[in-house]
Image (cartoon, helix red, strand yellow):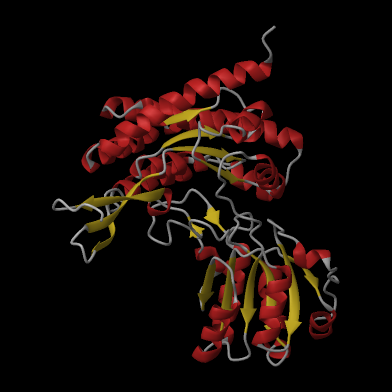
Amino acid sequence: MQTETDTVSRWLHKAAAAARAASSVLSRMPEAARNAGLRAAADSIRSRAAQIVDANARDIAAFDASGGTAAFRDRLLLDEARVEGMARGLDEIAALPDPLGRVLADWTRPNALRIRRIAQPLGVIGMIYESRPNVGADAAGICLKSGNAVILRGGSDSHHSARAIHSAITAGLRAAGVPEAAVQITPGTDRSYVAAMLGGSGLLDLIIPRGGRSLVERVQAEARVPVLAHAEGLCHTYVHEAANHAMARRLVANGKMRRTGVCGATETLLIDAAIAPALLPYIVSDLIALGCDFRADERAQTVVPGLKPATEEDFRTEWLGPTLSIAVVDGVDAALAHIARYGSSHTEAIVTQDEAVAMHFQMGVESAVCLWNASTQFCDGGEFGFGAEIGIATGRVHTRGPVGVEQLTTYRYIITGTGQVRP
């Protein structure tokens, strides 16, 4: 008797085989052909913007009926501007330099053998993501540019949006003569598709999860395929005693409140004891005006009475909403110790006019991204000039930080001889 697991397994084997063939074609395609496919996909998204927004409205209606949070709703929502942003992202990816065929190293051995290390695609990527439907478009664009095929599995909350976006992208690829199988999506959002992809050793070359802690932890625990993942975005902004006050106020407000649901949002403010009495009340006032709530340690409560007390767990929490944890620290080394204890190796920022302190801080944190006098919300592939990103990698293997087209390549060696034999 055929089971659901058997059906999903057969689907994955068929989809992965088609994706493998498509990746092989993509890797040999001239850059101009891949770019034409990306631009055609962008044009198709624009021409189908109304259908995509309508599909998203169905997802939003279901979400509203479930009573979810405002921050999660913002991640799910698509409007005309965000749809145009997806299309523009594909155009920007098309305009990037070709990541394939790059000579990463070139040297000649004493025996006159010339050895070159050349960039090439990873192969077939499995992308498992939640809530944000635009992730599917970013993943498709980055994979196409880098010669990889991708199999997408979006979340149940964004099911209608994800399928509408996928339909637009494949229509563009078809019009441009690029293999449609380069971008596939699971027929449904049942968890059996996740299980099949995680067990897809030999079918998929890499799994990238993008979502909450439970998704990432499940993928890391169960995957039989290499995983490129990030932990929580528990990002810190540290205001040093030599900070410019106006700059600090601006950067903390932006880092926390520009978009509270993104993984690069500041979740904890660390502020030096020497500057806290003069500056912290103004930072709190700015954030209250923007709708922010707080969890503060005892020293911060002394400076600004009335703040809600922070627990140990609060400093380990990625709020993904308008709540900020605050701790007063005694200098840069105390800030580094706090980050080492509570951080998730994602993104940190320091605000100071003291270059030596800034360098000490940047070399002292182990996070994938560290900024000096800039908002943590710049941890974004588009802001790095990557066109878009497929996620933020916080591990220590293969790549770190925003994952763009270059980060989805590996390499091989090309060796040229003149008749050498090994003695």
| 94 shown above or below 18 | below
User: At x 75% / y 82%, what residue is drawn?
Assistant: 328
Residue 76, can we see it? yes
| 168 shown above or below 357 | above
> Which quadrant of the structure image shows residue 157?
top right
> Which quadrant of the structure image shows residue 24?
top left
Q: Position of residue 265 (x, y in %)?
A: 61, 62
Q: Residue furthest top?
A: 1
Q: Position of residue 382 (x, y in %)?
A: 42, 56
Most foreground residue, 388 or 168 = 388
Q: Quadrant of the C terminus?
A: bottom left
User: At x 69% / y 13%, what residue is drawn?
Assistant: 3
Is residue 341 shown left or right of residue 86? right
Q: Residue furthest left?
A: 418
Most foreground residue, 117 or 353 = 117
- Say how many tags the image has: 0
Is residue 303 shown left or right of residue 284? right
> Which quadrant of the structure image shows residue 324?
bottom right
